[in-house]
Image (cartoon, rainbow, N blue to C red):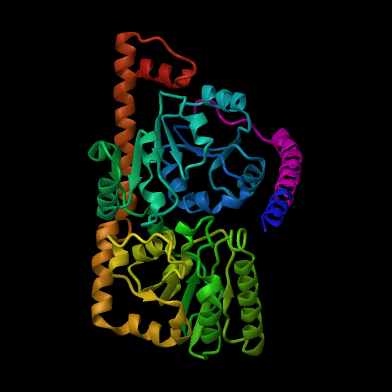
Amino acid sequence: MGVMSDGRKAVQLFRDALANRRARSELAGRLAALTPLERGHYKIAVYFADSKVNMYQIRQWYKPLAELSQTYPVVVLARAPTAATQLFEESPLDVAYVRTVTALESTLEEQDIRIVFYVNQNAKNFQMFRYGRCWHVFINHGESDKMYMTTNQFKAYDYAFIAGDAARERLTRALWDYDLERRALVIGRPQADHYAGRLPYTPDERTVVLYAPTWEGDREAAAYGSIATHGVALMKALLASPRHRVIYRPHPRSGVVDHAYGHANRQIIQAIEAANHADPSAHHVFDEGMDLGWQLAAADVAIVDISAMVYDRLAAGKPLLITRPVNPNAEIDTAGYLQACEWLSADHAANIIAETERVLHDPETVGRLEHWSHHYFGDTTPGETTKRFHAAVDTLMERWESFAEREARTGSATDPLAGTTAAVEAGRAGA
């Protein structure tokens, strides 16, 4: 088993190397044709060191950051060639490819970066932390009760933008000596203000069910994926019903670790194709697009695993079921919403029609959902979370100005490895 696993890893490493080589070749031509970024224009950077496989982590921030960029220009700093290639093709934000530390330094010297956002905990984030004259802010790629949300790595950042009271309580329980009041700024879920989108079907009397499972995880403690344990049974029942329409959106890493999940994923996709062929009016959807939002707004009921999708859906304030992990070693934080959520066990997956009816129409279930939605995200009135997001950025910009002016008054020397020359000069000019 170990030899087979090592062999698969070797093959994957070889494929990754080929992908990176192809991406670098394609980037060379693209970069030669690009107009250089306007010097001193950008105030905010999004640091993204991951490859194309984790693009979903930054995609969900496209719309909120594009709106923010109208006030504070934003640029994405891409470190990996495959991700940079994809970003150049699809990002509404300007992109700088900074594969090497030298390229990163050169870009920072040319810009007036005051805030750097991070959407994940990539080890290469550490390379960016060396620059001291900008705020390093962890904005994450979703709200959840997974152990990822309470890692001590929060302390590595100057600040973190968090969703609401639940996140505050979670961090208070988990982290020692963390100045939560100053370093964690509550913003809600800005993405929820951009959930609307064009539907790939015409709405009718069918009940729309979103099934958005996570991947299988790379260790037992994070074995939250349900495709192989719940997915085939529940999808078979829904696809057989003339009263339901399914939107299937699996995690892009499904089957990367466990081939059983990959096999189950393919089974479901094939079943959707067969159901649409048998009844073209059903318009079941296999969704692997980059946009996430319209699915959450359009679905009458969502079925999700323990992942950020729970809380993306909770931000919409609409009914959901959460699959209960089969692996007994999967860690479940029952201090938050998961203590009162609507669970779907594997042995009840085939009864999904009755389960969806219950969460849609039971008054107690609906009331609990409203309570927890407010606990996690505060006021979810359209536009309110965007206001909080922008206010948090304004606060950090004001703090940056204060520190820059103080440095200019005291005449502190500029350390080229601590921050950008442009940033310090801007502080002196404003003093």
Indicate whether residue 337 is drawn in magenta: no
Quarter of the image holding residue 281?
A: bottom right
Image quadrant for the C terminus? top left
Is residue 4 visible in the rendered structure shown here?
yes
In percent of the image, x 40 and y 41: which residue is there?
Answer: 138
Image quadrant for the N terminus? bottom right
Q: Is residue 367 above or below residue 33?
A: below
Write the start and end of the magenta stretch as one range: 11-40
Is residue 379 visible in the rendered structure shown here?
no
Q: Estimate the x, y position of residue 253 in percent, counting from the top left.
A: 59, 59
Q: Is residue 107 above or below residue 354?
A: above
In percent of the image, x 34 and y 44: which residue is there?
Answer: 161
Q: Estimate the x, y position of residue 50 in percent, counting from the top left.
A: 57, 43
Q: Report the magenta stretch's main SS.
A: helix
| Position of residue 43 in the picture relative to residue 380 (left or right) | right
| Position of residue 241 in the picture relative to residue 180 (left or right) | right
In percent of the image, x 25 and y 72: which residue is there?
Answer: 368
In percent of the image, x 40 and y 39: which residue is there?
Answer: 153
Quarter of the image holding residue 101?
A: top right
Q: Estimate the x, y position of residue 131 in percent, counting from the top left.
A: 46, 24
Indicate whether residue 35 is drawn in magenta: yes
Q: Observer-nearest residue: 76 or 265? A: 265
Number of marks in the rendered image: 0
